[in-house]
């Protein structure tokens, strides 16, 4: 049954009014106590582009929260840094004034490398960062990108979003197409029927190896709240997940709600959904199933 789902969320920016970019350790505990009620037993807080100082403060607070977790909380597994190393032409909601060159030196400006598990970046702009991250056993994901080459990445970030989509005439040149056919690459997907329509989702789930699909919410701080609007990446985001110009900032649904929509649509079976919410995450992150 869907109520028995176990969910590991690898890409989420907050919820219940909590924004991980400025959350205190107490805020993180509050979030962890509430998201577990949505069947999320573990998660990786995702940080959006911000100043180095603000991101280091966020990293410090997340590390503090990780060190003091309680049994009634979803487990914090580390940090997904979706920040600063993106392509300005695919910036989405991110603030490009804080973008950095993709160098090891710039990555070393961030603190607490030991808790950074995933970095989303634009590999076409790489200046040595990718190999540096791999030397530190950090997962490299291609996102907010126009990349053509998938040889050095572990996964794609929110597949089809902030990258060329199937409607592009030369779509087959880009990683969004190439990753679908490569069993060495995992793909994140936001299956909320807003970021990707039903026909795109059908194509994706038919094409991509189901062992390599990671369902994500990319949920915003406004998810699971009664707020009408929030500040996110320096912009006002409304309760439809969009800014005033209609640019999507992320999802307003949790993965539990997304799973319900997928099951109702008959795109995936319950067993396939379970695999993409839990088993694939374990394999991708190299986690021991007995720990969960």
Image: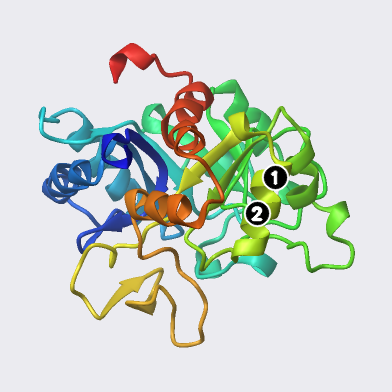
User: Extreme bottom residue here?
Assistant: 244
Q: Which mark is residue 206?
A: 1
Distance, label 2 to label 1, CA atoms, is 6 Å
Q: Quadrant of residue 187?
A: top right
Q: Quadrant of residue 43?
A: top left
Q: Which of 114 and 79 is in front in this view?
A: 79
Residue under numbered circle 2: 202
Q: Which residue is drawn at 37% across and 58% down?
A: 219
Q: Is residue 97 above or below residue 123?
A: below
Answer whether labels 2 and 1 touch (C-beta < 8 Å): yes
Q: In this view, does 265 lie to the left or right of 182?
A: left
**In which quadrant is the C terminus drawn?**
top left
Q: Is residue 36 above or below residue 160?
A: above
Q: Residue at x 36, y 65 (%)?
A: 252
Q: Is mark 2 on a helix, strand or loop?
A: helix
Q: Residue at x 89, y 62 (%)?
A: 170
Q: Where is residue 61 in the image (x, y as percent from the top left)?
A: 22, 43
Q: In this view, does 272 lie to the left or right of 48?
A: right
**In which quadrant is the N terminus drawn?**
top left
């Amino acid at each position: 049954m869907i109520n028995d789902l176990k969910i590991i969320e690898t890409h989420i920016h907050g919820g219940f009014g909590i924004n991980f970019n400025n959350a205190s350790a107490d805020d993180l505990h509050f979030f962890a106590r509430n998201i577990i009620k949505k069947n999320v037993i573990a998660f990786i807080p995702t940080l959006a582009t911000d100043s180095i100082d603000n991101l280091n403060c966020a990293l410090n607070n997340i590390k503090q929260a990780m060190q003091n977790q309680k049994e009634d909380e979803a487990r914090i597994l580390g940090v997904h840094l979706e920040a600063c190393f993106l392509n300005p032409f695919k910036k989405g909601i991110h603030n490009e004034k804080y973008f950095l060159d993709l160098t090891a030196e710039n990555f070393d400006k961030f603190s607490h490398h030991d808790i950074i598990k995933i970095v989303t970046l634009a590999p076409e702009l790489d200046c040595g960062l990718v190999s540096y991250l791999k030397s530190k056993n950090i997962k490299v994901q291609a996102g907010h990108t126009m990349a053509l080459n998938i040889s050095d990445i572990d996964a794609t970030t929110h597949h089809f979003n902030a990258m060329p989509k199937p409607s592009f005439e030369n779509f087959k040149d880009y990683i969004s197409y190439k990753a679908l056919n490569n069993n060495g690459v995992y793909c994140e997907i936001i299956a909320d029927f807003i970021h990707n329509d039903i026909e795109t989702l059908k194509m994706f789930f038919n094409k991509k190896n189901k062992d390599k699909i990671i369902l994500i919410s990319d949920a915003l701080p406004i998810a699971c709240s009664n707020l009408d609007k929030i500040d996110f990446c320096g912009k006002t985001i409304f309760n439809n997940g969009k800014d005033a110009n209609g640019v999507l900032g992320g999802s307003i649904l949790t993965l539990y709600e997304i799973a319900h929509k997928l099951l109702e649509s008959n795109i995936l079976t319950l067993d396939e959904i379970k695999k993409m919410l839990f088993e694939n995450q374990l394999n991708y992150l190299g986690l021991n199933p007995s720990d969960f």
